[in-house]
Amino acid sequence: MINIRNELFLLKDDKYKNFQGKLLPGINNFIGVRVPVVRKLSTSISYEEKINYIENYNCEFLEEYLLKGLFISDICDINLVIKYTKQFIKQIDNWEVCDIFASSLKIVKENKKIFLDFINNYFNSNKEYEKRFVFVILLNYYINDEYVDKIFEIICKVKCSYYYDKMALAWLISYLYINYKNKTLYFFKHCNIDSDIYNMSIKKIIESNKVCKSDKYILNKLKSVQK
């Protein structure tokens, strides 16, 4: 295997590292490699080396965790992906690794039922990034006619305790509004969600350029109402 850590340090960008530090408060274990550069490095690694890395490599830096997530997303066996995902999400401690990993798992598109059964185990997790991972997966792969009602059923029951899982849920709800406006308005009226998530969701919807001005005006009034 090539020396991954040495390769990453050769690719570091100090200007980006300073910018990255502002996006990831409280996270200090990053080298400063831009995400497209990490992706490009990922494509240069053989499949056998990727499996060896996933199973044996001791990650220390954020970019090394990013690579592990990308390597898992390159696997074509859904059962193996689930096995490694189950191990990996315990190691995630920031939104960047969480979101890039979840959005890279394209295999979910063809295995929605199997993967939904898997993430069902995490709906009641008390871990911030396990919960966020679930919401980002739902956002990327399940907002469609077949699963939209199931998503609303899930988020009416789920409880969030931390900033980054609440923000991901608000992000998910904003996408639901864009794609299923009436169902989402019904959800706002009838589901007793946390006031932080309620207001975060409306803020996210208002910020979207896919929502018309008249809707934003109405939603802004809803945001001011204390749930």
Image: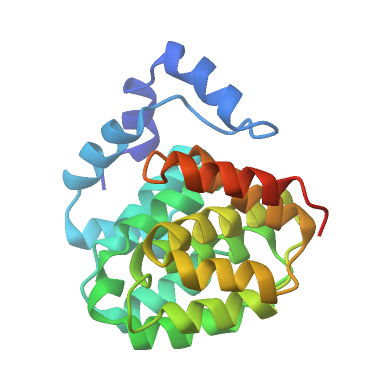
User: Is residue 125 or residue 192 the one in the foreground?
Assistant: 192
Q: What x and y, as percent, mark residue 17? A: 49, 20
Q: What x and y, as percent, mark residue 65? A: 46, 48
User: Is residue 77 or residue 4 the one in the foreground?
Assistant: 77
Q: What x and y, as percent, mark residue 95? A: 55, 46
Residue in view at x 77 percent, y 63 percent: 194
Left or right side of 68 for 25: right
Residue in view at x 26 percent, y 73 percent: 109
User: Can the viewer see residue 206 in this picture?
Assistant: yes
Residue in view at x 43 percent, y 82 percent: 116
Q: Which corner quadrant of the image does residue 108 belong to?
A: bottom left
Left or right side of 140 for 123: right
In the rendered view, would you say 186 is above or below 70? Answer: below
Q: What x and y, as percent, mark residue 76? A: 20, 73
Number of numbered discs visible in the structure rendering = 0
User: Is residue 30 or residue 193 the one in the foreground?
Assistant: 193
